[in-house]
Amino acid sequence: MSFLSRARKVDLTTLAKELGLTVESDAKVSDVLKLITNEKNYDEDFTKDCLEVITNERLDKRKDENEKREYELKKLESKATLSDGNVPLTVPKLNLMKLMPRYDVESDISVYLSLYNKTDNQHRYSYPG
């Protein structure tokens, strides 16, 4: 009977339903345990085998769902990484300070700002986005 106390509620509920017992949706684990063990045709070995099969099926189903989810995620990531096979969808970040000369304190700031705006506009629209 100790194997029953280690089982999850969902597995115990499924076991009870397969044994032909009716289980309320709000039943506690202890209630489901009593329902299973107090059944007139209760056989510990049969119950243990059934519970093992139910648990393995649930775990296999969860594993398959996780693998499917991971596959879909990798598929979406590869699709997002390369739009046509060669060009990354993400636009690389530009450091305008590397593209422009440093500001000379003795010169006029308006010339520097207009040069900054032109450089910014040129490189902002040169990448597909």
Image (cartoon, rainbow, N blue to C red):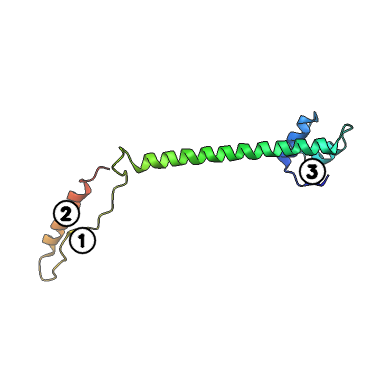
Closer to us: 90 or 60: 60
Disc 3/disc 1 C-alpha distance (Å)? 68 Å
Q: Which mark is residue 106?
A: none
**Image x and y of residue 119, in percent:** 16, 54
CB-based contact (under 8 Å), mark 3 and mark 1: no
Q: Which mark is residue 98?
A: 1
Q: Quadrant of the N terminus?
A: top right
Q: Nearer the viewer, mark 2 or mark 3?
A: 3
Vertical position of residue 56 compared to residue 99: above or below: above
Q: Secondary structure at mark 3?
A: helix
- Horizontal side of 28 relative to 37 (left or right) equals left
Q: Secondary structure at mark 2?
A: helix
Amino acid bearing label 2: Thr
**Image x and y of residue 12, in percent:** 75, 38
Disc 2/disc 3 C-alpha distance (Å)? 72 Å
- Tell me if mark 3 has few (under 14), some (14-19) or many (20+) residues whose alpha carbon lies within 10 angstroms of its own: many
The residue identified by callout 2 is 119
Vertical position of residue 21 compared to residue 27: above or below: above
Most extreme residue toward the top, as rendered? Answer: 20
Q: Nearer the viewer, mark 3 or mark 1?
A: 3
- Tell me if mark 2 has few (under 14), some (14-19) or many (20+) residues whose alpha carbon lies within 10 angstroms of its own: some
Residue shown at 84% from the left, 39% from the top: 44
Most extreme residue toward the bottom, as rendered? Answer: 106
CB-based contact (under 8 Å), mark 2 and mark 1: no
**Image x and y of residue 78, in percent:** 39, 41
Amino acid bearing label 3: Leu
- Horizontal side of 76 relative to 100 (left or right) equals right
Closer to us: 121 or 113: 121
The residue identified by callout 3 is 4
